[in-house]
Amino acid sequence: DTLMALPTVFIGLLVYALVTSRGPLGDFGLLFTLPGIAIGQTILALPVVTALTATAVESMDADLRTTLLSLGANRRQLVLSSLWEVRHGILSAALTAYGRVMTEVGISMMVGGNIKWHTRTITTAIALETNKGMFATGIALGLILLLIALTVNAVASFLRKH
């Protein structure tokens, strides 16, 4: 669970060190690219998804496996039934990770460089516009980000109920 609290700026610094021209992944040209940002976002999201999914699996009814085996379930059916049982926990883990990634600025700024029409994300654009004194633009972008978040949550809520 400790990795869930990794500061995004630290992850950005780590990924920057890996993908810079002198870093071990420098030959791949990932610095100031969307794939470079995606690597950082994945490192940010993975501990969240792992920890929350593990919690969901650990909270699963211990008798489920025994019951399924006694009913003649094979290994594939056992896995699929177990995944079905913890589907809400997995969805919550994915939403939590999405929320953390969606609001992140540090990794995107450090690894992506906030290059207009290339690596600028909504969150880095909000930071830039606010720093330039364009508060209204920052608010408008923030409202767009909020609308996206509400839409994702509405879809997730629909999936949870159906």
Image (spheres, rainbow, N blue to C red):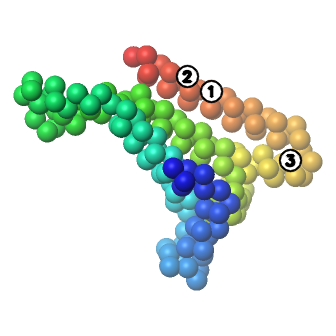
Q: Name the residue type under label 3.
A: Thr
Q: Is residue 161 left or right of residue 29?
A: left
Q: Is residue 140 above or below residue 32?
A: above
Q: Name the residue type under label 1.
A: Leu
Q: Residues within 10 Å of mark 3 (few under 14, many from 20)?
A: some
Relative image position of residue 88 (x, y in whole percent): 41, 28
Asked if disc 3 and disc 1 are in contact, CB closer than 8 Å, the reply is no
Q: Is residue 114 left or right of residue 74?
A: right
The C terminus lies in which quarter of the figure?
Answer: top left
Instruction: Compute the Cα span from label 3 to label 2.
Output: 29 Å
Q: Please tell me which residue lies in front, 73 or 34.
A: 73
> Would you say residue 22 is visible in this rendering?
yes
Instruction: Compute the Cα span from label 2 to label 1.
Output: 6 Å
Residue on which disc 3 sits? 130
Q: Please tell me which residue lies in front, 3 or 93.
A: 3
Q: Please tell me which residue lies in front, 104 or 71.
A: 71
Residue 134 falls in which quadrant of the image? top right
Asked if disc 3 and disc 2 are in contact, CB closer than 8 Å, the reply is no
Q: Is residue 155 above or below residue 124?
A: above
Relative image position of residue 66 (x, y in whole percent): 16, 30
Q: Earlier in the sequence, mark 3 or mark 2?
A: 3
Name the element at disc 1. helix
Q: Is residue 158 above or below residue 41?
A: above
Residue 112 falls in which quadrant of the image? bottom right
Asked if disc 2 and disc 1 are in contact, CB closer than 8 Å, the reply is yes
The residue under the point 75% across, 37% down is 142
Name the element at disc 2. helix
Residue on which disc 1 sits? 150
Q: Name the residue type under label 2.
A: Ala
Q: Is residue 107 above or below residue 95?
A: below
Residue on which disc 2 sits? 154
